[in-house]
Image (cartoon, rainbow, N blue to C red):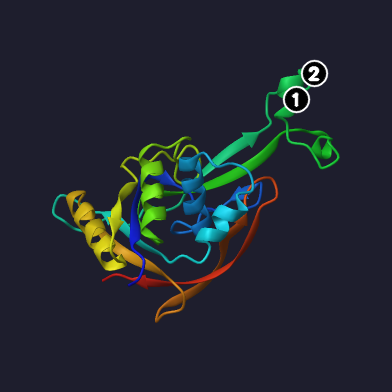
């Protein structure tokens, strides 16, 4: 008998799931990454630092995703919103003579201001008005602990970045298999007048196959990741 699945519902006005981001340009993948979901669970546990053992435990666990968009009053599927681009100035307006404010100014590895100035321009991208059902497989006892942590998180929970606040309870129960978990997700989506548009399966299947560097091996100051193959399938 295979392990059950924990269903997580990720819904917010804005979400951002970085997978290939630099300091000045922080993109978002079209769906939640495994590193983002495991980071969310670390927040629920209040688990900081490297967390190599916890990450190794969940690294090879199956994770399935289904994406949902809203419909109008007549039940017609609304077109997906484009990525939102947010322009930010980092390190602007700080007094470098103040010891605390000086810590907030971006610096080079040698501790100096880059190019003689501390202000840096950054662009950040967000998914708009999306909802995702995420089913994570694991032993019953471990999934129950995850569910409890999501219901009583130690740290604030957010969907990719700290300004991406969830608008629905994330934990939606532990289910005997992925089919039952996604059936529960479909019921929730129907109550919210949302319809599925695509799903993401772990591994190689008959669809668009992607290689993502999103399996975290180590968090903390020096993050480490390895690749994962996933397949994106449209839902008609």
Residue depicted at x 59% and y 45%? 123
- List x then y, in percent, for residue 148: 36, 43
Q: Does 130 appear above or below 211?
A: above
Question: Quadrant of residue 196 in the image?
Answer: bottom left
Foreground of the two, 160 or 82: 160
The reply to whether dot 2 and dot 1 touch (C-beta < 8 Å) is yes
Residue depicted at x 28% and y 61%? 181
- List x then y, in percent, for residue 113: 81, 35
Q: Which mark is residue 97?
A: 2
Q: CA distance from mark 2 to mark 1?
A: 7 Å
Q: Does 44 appear above or below 93?
A: below
Foreground of the two, 139 or 207: 139
Residue depicted at x 76% and y 17%? 98
Quadrant of image for the N terminus? bottom left
Question: Quadrant of residue 184 in the image?
Answer: bottom left
Residue 20 at least partly seen: no
Is 1 on the left-hand or right-hand side of 109? Answer: left
- Neighbours of disc 1 within 10 Å: few (<14), some (14-19), many (20+): some
Which badge, 2 or 1, comes first in the chain's sequence? 2
Residue depicted at x 29% and y 70%? 235
Q: Which mark is residue 102?
A: 1
State the residue lying farthest toward the left.
74
- List x then y, in percent, for residue 105: 73, 31
- List x then y, in percent, for residue 157: 44, 39
Is 199 on the left-hand or right-hand side of 155? Answer: left
Q: What SS does tag 1 mark?
A: helix
């Amino acid at each position: 008998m295979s392990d059950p699945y924990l269903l997580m519902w990720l819904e917010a006005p804005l979400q951002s799931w970085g997978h290939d981001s630099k300091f000045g340009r922080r993109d978002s993948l079209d769906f939640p990454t495994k590193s983002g979901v495991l980071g969310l669970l670390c927040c629920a546990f209040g688990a900081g630092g490297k967390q190599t053992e916890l990450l190794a435990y969940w690294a090879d666990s199956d994770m399935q995703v289904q994406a949902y968009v809203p419909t109008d009053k007549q039940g017609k599927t609304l077109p997906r919103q484009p990525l939102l681009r947010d322009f930010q100035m980092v390190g602007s307006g700080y007094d470098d003579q103040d010891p605390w404010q000086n810590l907030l100014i971006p610096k080079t590895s040698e501790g100096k201001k880059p190019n003689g100035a501390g202000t840096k321009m950054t662009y950040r991208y967000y998914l708009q008005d999306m909802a995702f059902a995420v089913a994570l497989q694991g032993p019953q006892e471990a999934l129950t602990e995850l569910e409890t942590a999501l219901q009583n998180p130690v740290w604030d929970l957010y969907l990719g970045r700290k300004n991406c606040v969830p608008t629905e309870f994330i934990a939606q129960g532990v289910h005997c298999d992925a089919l039952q978990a996604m059936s529960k997700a479909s019921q929730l989506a129907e109550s919210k007048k949302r319809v599925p548009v695509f799903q993401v399966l772990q591994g190689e299947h008959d669809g668009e196959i992607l290689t993502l560097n999103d399996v975290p091996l180590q968090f903390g100051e020096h993050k480490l990741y390895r690749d994962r193959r996933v397949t994106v399938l449209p839902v008609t």
